[in-house]
Image (spheres, helix red, strand yellow):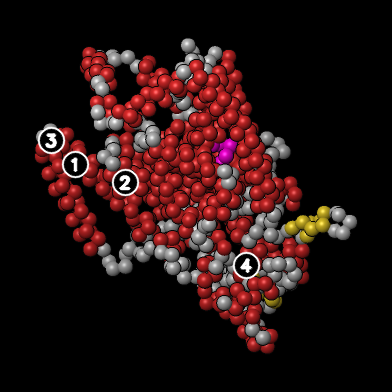
Amino acid sequence: MPSSSPLITWSLNLLKLYLFIQFILKAFNIRLHAINDYGLVIHEFDPWFNYRATEYLDEWGLSKFFHWFDYMSWYPLGRPVGTTIYPGLQITSVAIKNVLEGYAPEGWAMSLNDVCCYVPAWFGAIASILTGILTLEVTKSHTSAVFATGIMGIVPAHLMRSIGGGYDNESIALTAMMMTFLCWVVSLRSTAMAVPFGIATGFAYIYMVAAWGGYVFVLNMVGVHAAALIGLGRFSTKLHISYSLFYLIGTYGAIQIPVVGWTPLKSLEQLGPCAVFLGMQVIAAGEYWIKAKQIEKGERWQLRFKAYGAAGALLLLVVACLPGGYFGPLSSRIRGLFVQHTRTGNPLVDSVAEHQPASPAAYYQYLNILCNFAPIGFLMVLSNLNDQSGFLILYAMVTYFFSAKMVRLIILTGPIAAILGGYFLGYMADWSFDQLFGGADGGEKGEGEKEKVSKEGSEAPSTPADKKKKAKQAASARKPKKADSGMMPSEVTEMIQLATTKYKSVEGQFMRKIAAVGFFFMLMTYGREFVGYCDKMAVALSNPSIMFKAQLRNGQTIIIDDYREAYWWLRDNTPEDSRVMAWWDYGYQITGIANRTTVADGNTWNHEHIALLGRCLTSPEKEAHRVARHLADYVLIWAGGGGDDLAKSPHMAR
């Protein structure tokens, strides 16, 4: 009896497509609260530096951008912006603006400011789509893919860095990361897919490197997965080809980006994937030699040990010949993730709230009900382990470990939580649908398993050897398993048989239908709560610090724009070469909005410079003036509100 009629199947597929489109639109619209309420305004502090850099790139071009030395920041030292910035965000925005101006229909052209405001929303939706496709690739379930897309689109862990106007590196970095992971997983599908998608993985990784410093996580995630497959004895031609192409193309491209340079071959946190690449070449050469010489099984491991030992000795010799200090130590931020008492060494960075360890409350704040669903999905993936799904297992474990060390990294848990939660919900939705509309068998197989079975059933043996192999497999399948021949206690066997009988009985079918109805009721109830919670979080995350709402006594809501007006006053009423001293928080906005030289900003690369600034702002007036008059023409002080300079003065003094 078929599981469902063609009409029901067609209707269900149409519903999935409709939901998929609606989820994408929701992912875009939920990020527009700030734009709808405050207009097309760049938010916060760091985004103003990114916008100013984008303006420079748009005006002067890529070559001058990479050689840009900014004399308006960190006076009197300045900053070499071109070699200290990840340029992916700026290049992407300028490219979109130029495409809209040159090729889009009339009326679609947008100013650079408007493009930068919309980029987080656009790329947030794209990241959601890529997450859904990755879920489909691993689970083979369209239902799970739809759920994962919807969850990724609205989960606060993703919203936190992709709100419209929040023009920051992470707003495109998650899209680049998911693109890299998707291409990598697809490349492991078969040997035929290894070449095109291995190349695609390399180029996607280059974009990731250009987008965000978190590219180190992506590099090591792929490297750890490849190493795990080798360790589990799953080395294959497809793995060798795809990883080699990824590493060669990706590393070559990464080296071309000025802020990265040769660190992929010198920095300790990036040498692990390099070692995996070199080891993989040794393994591949050894396996080729074994096949070419037709070496007997007994001698193969002896040859392998000799080859691996010689390769290891050669590697140690090369390392010993390199000049002292060639390999750099682990960066301070990486050390801080492994050693609890070790932080960056920069008290300004260490004191930032998002650099503190994550608490259980933080996970629930940014993942909500996924804290309950994702672990179930994790176990489901673990029970169906293969080359592709193994990546999700490692991804979940690694992101949980690092996010527990630094709350900012909870952003990395958003995609994997969406995938695992979507897998669980998709499987349960398929199962429940089969109970209500399927055949008498109760629909025990999920969508992905049905697809696999149908493929296997449609492939008839084409040669006598294939027929012989199939017959041998069928005969072995008919043999009693060890559990049936006395390895499992008879009581347990009887319980399993009884449970199976009850499950397939008339009463069991009725109870399954009740459970299916209960699941859909739960889905509607918790789904509505989850969407409502995400909407509230989106509104909370959409309050730019540079503008805010207030309510008059008569109940009228107004927008307080004093901060920008103050910067505009500086721009219009001070000489162009004026130097403005303020706490480093405001540096990016002073240069980005007021277009004036500032003493320090959020780059926080010079501890002594900021210490001198803090001394000037907290010392008695006469003592402070003796120092400040050599550095600045004006001093900007924020007064009023909970986060003004008076509230920050203890931090300045430290």
Secondary structure, mark 3, is: helix
Q: Earlier in the sequence, mark 2 or mark 1?
A: 2
Q: Amino acid at mark 4?
A: Asp
Residue span colored magenta = 148-152
Is there CB contact under 8 Å for labels 4 and 1? no
Residue at x 47% of width, y 58% of height = 405
- Distance from the alpha carbon under mark 4 to that under mark 1: 56 Å
Find residue 363 and report its horizontal and vertical position in percent. Answer: 54, 51
The label on residue 227 is 2
Q: Earlier in the sequence, mark 2 or mark 4?
A: 2
> Mark 3 = which residue?
297
Residue at x 66% of width, y 64% of height = 589
Dominant SS of magenta comes to helix
Left or right position of 128 against 323: right
Q: Amino acid at mark 3?
A: Lys
The label on residue 286 is 1
Determine the image quadrant of residue 10.
Answer: top right
